[in-house]
Amino acid sequence: AQTVTQSQPEMSVQEAETVTLSCTYDTSENNYYLFWYKQPPSRQMILVIRQEAYKQQNATENRFSVNFQKAAKSFSLKISDSQLGDTAMYFCAFMKHETSGTYKYIFGTGTRLKVLA
Amino acid sequence: NAGVMQNPRHLVRRRGQEARLRCSPMKGHSHVYWYRQLPEEGLKFMVYLQKENIIDESGMPKERFSAEFPKEGPSILRIQQVVRGDSAAYFCASSLRTSGISYEQYFGPGTRLTVT
């Protein structure tokens, strides 16, 4: 079974600085997808960035980028120029196509990020 | 284009009562997923439905929980005889298809169920 591990329960960063959130996963699959979601206090799940495992190039979305190391099964999120609005829980998630036809997310336990003024 | 709608946003039930949670997927989406988030945890998959069909319910507790997605109307997650351990946030997500680039799921705002 696939597992997703986020080893940093809490992190803090000064406004305008850069922070990296760690995520490792375990799978025997070759084709899968990885995601980072942000959950602010409103509890809404907001997609931050996605990565297809078959793509070697690391995904970037404005201030957010990932370091995808397929062999090491690592998928870290880098937030540059941190802003107060980035304060939230961040969840790493894994998805693959199941034999049942399902695509379901497997989430890590989250990292609580606080951006300090 | 409205996003995924869930109601109610907050639901309080006494032990032994029934809870009904509703989810309207995004327009054009025919695939619905339910996830449960216990306090201080990540979301856990419960069930995947297409119109009038349950495709994968491997994450659903065997008793008291059921889900449906009728031909017309929202998807319903039903919890009978609620217990305190059912207190959680329940999220619905929808997707357009299950292949290619349309695998991504869009989440609703969640329903927070409190059992007293």
Image (spheres, coloured by chain):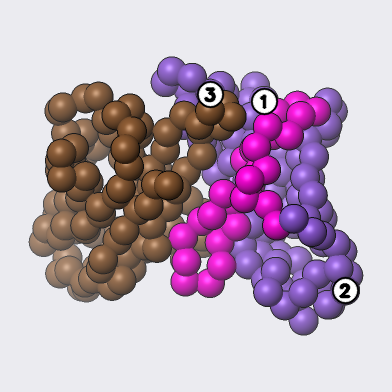
Q: Is residue A45 part of the magenta span, yes or no?
A: no
The earlier-in-sequence mark between 1 and 2 is 2
Display colour for chain B: purple
Q: Label 3 belongs to which residue?
A: B98
Residue A22: image location, x then y, percent: 21, 57
Q: CA distance from mark 3 to mark 2?
A: 37 Å
How many circles with numbers are drawn on the protein? Answer: 3
Q: Are marks 1 and 2 in contact (CB under 8 Å)?
A: no
Residue B36: image location, x then y, percent: 60, 57
**Residue in front for this viewpoint, B36 or A38:** B36
Q: Is residue A22 left or right of residue A50?
A: left
Rendered-image quadrant of the N terminus of chain B:
top right
Residue B95: image location, x then y, percent: 56, 30
Q: Is residue B36 part of the magenta span, yes or no?
A: yes
Q: Label 1 belongs to which residue?
A: B30
Q: CA distance from mark 1 to mark 2?
A: 32 Å
